[in-house]
Amino acid sequence: MARPLRAAVAATGSWIDPDGFRSPAGEVHAWLPGTNQTVCGLPIKKSGFGRFSHIEWSDVQPATGRDADRVTSVCRRCLAGTGQRRDDKPWTRHDPRP
């Protein structure tokens, strides 16, 4: 299966940012607009997720995203489905011995 290039966001909650836009909150999942499930296979309506078609998946990543203020967790299966590798570490190793 080809990896999705432009995934949107489905989340368990929402909030209104200071600019007046609806933003995701809680647990976030990648979602391809036009489908009825997340990238990891959870049905959107039965799971109670809200759709955020105006926000891209890359914008809710806690390390770099602009819309990640109230995101508590990111689905690891959706991360893998959108192309993030397991061995991508957010840290770097420095010489441990002086």
Image: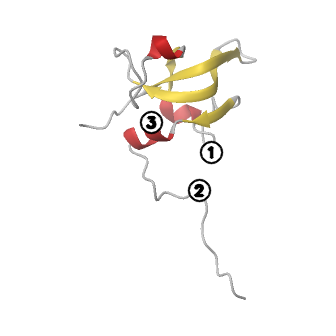
Residue 12 lies in what quarter of the image? top right
Q: Nearer the viewer, residue 56 or 44?
A: 44
Element at badge 2? Answer: loop
Q: Position of residue 79 (x, y in %)?
A: 46, 40
Report whether 21 appears left or right of 2: right
Q: Earlier in the sequence, mark 2 or mark 3?
A: 3
Q: Position of residue 50 (x, y in %)?
A: 55, 14
Residue at (65%, 16%) from the top-left corner?
14
Quadrant where the N terminus lies? top left
Residue 10: percent from the left, percent from the top?
51, 21
Q: Residue at x 71, y 16 (%)?
A: 19
Residue at image mark 2: 90
Up the image or down, 12 lies above or below 45; here it is below
Residue 47 lies, with reference to residue 89, above or below; the image says above
* Residue depicted at x 49% and y 57%: 88
Q: Could you tell whether 5 is left or right of 90 in the image?
A: left
In this rendered view, identify the residue nearer to me: 38 or 68.
Answer: 38
Q: Which residue is mark 1?
A: 63
Name the residue carrying label 3. Answer: 78
Are discs 2 and 1 less than 8 Å apart at CB?
A: yes
